[in-house]
Amino acid sequence: MNISRSGVLFLSCIDLPPETIIVMKIMLPFELLDKSATIVCCWGQVVRKDAVLTEKCDCPVLAAAILRYRFSDD
């Protein structure tokens, strides 16, 4: 849904409580870096959970702080 260098807001199919440690792999498109697509492996922590109830989805929206990251080839 939204990403910055310090955190990410995303729709999750798993209901995770705040303070849960998570690992995320984010693919940066090649248009962003003028080279092949790059994968960033991020370690973070859930800081907020919001309920989203719509006709199509009853999944929570999670906000996570990015604690550490590294660029990956895989």
Image (tube, rainbow, N blue to C red):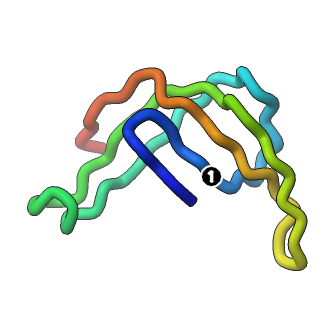
Residue annotated with mark 1: 10
Q: Amino acid at mark 1?
A: Phe
Q: Residue furthest bottom?
A: 55
- Taking the spot 25% from the left edge, 50% from the top edge, the residue there is 38
Q: Percent from the top left, x then y, of residue 17? A: 81, 30
> x%, y% of residue 50?
80, 47
Q: Position of residue 39 (x, y in %)?
A: 31, 47
Q: What is the x, y in percent for residue 8?
A: 53, 44
Position of 21 with respect to 29 (left or right) is: right
Relative to residue 72, is residue 36 drawn left or right? left
Quadrant for the N terminus, please.
bottom right
- For the residue labelled by badge 1, is the local secondary structure a helix, a strand or a loop? strand
Q: Nearer the viewer, residue 15 or 48?
A: 48
Q: Answer with left or right where residue 66 lies relative to residue 70.
A: right
As drawn, the residue found furthest toward the left would be: 34
**Residue found 71% across the figure and 24% down from its top:** 20
Q: Residue at x 89, y 65 (%)?
A: 53
Quarter occupied by the C terminus: top left
